[in-house]
Amino acid sequence: MAVLLIGEVTDGALAVDATAKAVAAVKALGDVTVLCAGASATAAAAEAAKIDGVSKVLCAEDAALGHRLAEPTADLIVSLAGDYTHIVAPGTTDAKNVMPRVAALLDAMIISEVTGVLDADTFERPIYAGNAIQKVKSTDAKKVMTIRTAGFEAAGMGGSATVESIGAAGDPGLSEWVEDKVAASDRPELTSAGVVVSGGRGVGSEADFALIEQLADKLNAAVGASRAAVDSGYAPNDWQVGQTGKVVAPDLYVAVGISGAIQHLAGMKDSKIIVAINKDEEAPIFQVADFGLVADLFVAVPELTAKL
């Protein structure tokens, strides 16, 4: 058996954390080859070669691959698929765009958000907002999967895999890049941060969300939000944590003014330590919290920030 793992390459840089966690998830399935594709991917390929458990790195540089378009990337992956039994990617936004297309072209089912690899054909994934774990056994000749990396420890960085340059499969011309609009931030990236501070509907307004940001800055943390807070306009969409947002598993997750709806818990309940601040002592968030403070957030959060 052999695994082709799609490395997450953005603007020539490898998302090392997500890629290393995906390697850790699948390395028991066989030799792992990492594909780094982009208009510039040499530096990313060199970084991927350092990950423990990677036996080989394929580096594909082509202008058609430069903006993470699904069609040319999927065609490249399919052109390489013949040598592999498992085609895998970390469950990022890009992978959710590319991998279903890969599965369709290979006439295989896609097994998304894998949290456990039981054997070469059998995998675990959460369903019903994480309230049940589904065991999936696939009979497809090639398994196409995305990995929920939050549940895995990253592989080490002591490897020395070989790097091979390959060409792109060509551009089918089905879509084109227009522009990227990326929010600039000095804070850690939400899905890989060690500490996350999230605010919910209880924060009350976009202006008061500054309390959450100030606490996050003191903790060098990423900022998250519940869907209720995002829908109310208190926080931008890319801060949303939950079933329809981002899945995080930091060392510390601080939930402020978040009631703990099942959809939000699905995105953060694997956090190592959960701290909840809410004035409603019956809030469901306290059922999963390691530490709970029943208090008015407008008093407790400024006090906590000041003491930090």
Image (tube, helix red, strand yellow):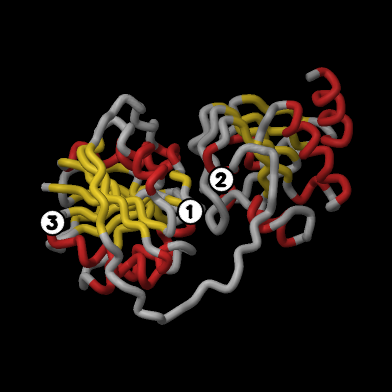
Task: Examine the image and state in which quarter residue 220 appears.
Answer: top right
Q: Amino acid at mark 3?
A: Asp
Q: Earlier in the sequence, mark 2 or mark 1?
A: 1
Q: Which mark is residue 129?
A: 1
Q: Which residue is mark 3?
A: 83
Q: Residues within 10 Å of mark 1 (few under 14, many from 20)?
A: some
Q: Residue at coordinates 77% horizontally, 39% vertically from top-left?
A: 213
Q: Position of residue 130 (x, y in %)?
A: 45, 49
Res 134 seen here: no
Task: Examine the image and state in which quarter residue 128 appears.
Answer: bottom left
For the residues labelled 3 and 1, say whether their Cβ atoms are less than 8 Å apart.
no
Q: Position of residue 294 (x, y in %)?
A: 76, 30
Q: Earlier in the sequence, mark 3 or mark 1?
A: 3
Does 277 appear above or below 81? above
Spatial separation of the CA atoms under disc 3 and disc 2: 39 Å
Q: Amino acid at mark 2?
A: Leu
Q: Residue at coordinates 69% horizontally, 44% vertically from top-left?
A: 185
**Residue sticking out furthest to the top:** 307
Does 140 sit left or right of 109 as displayed? Answer: left
Q: Which residue is mark 2?
A: 265
State which mark lies toward you, 3 or 1: 3
Res 61 seen here: yes
Tally of marks? 3
Spatial separation of the CA atoms under disc 2 and disc 1: 8 Å
State which mark lies toward you, 3 or 2: 3
Q: Position of residue 88 (x, y in %)?
A: 29, 52
Q: Amino acid at mark 1?
A: Ala
Q: Residue at coordinates 34% horizontally, 70% vertically from top-left?
A: 101
Does 126 appear above or below 303? below
Spatial separation of the CA atoms under disc 3 and disc 1: 35 Å
Q: Position of residue 164 (x, y in %)?
A: 23, 47
Q: What kind of element bears circle 3?
A: helix
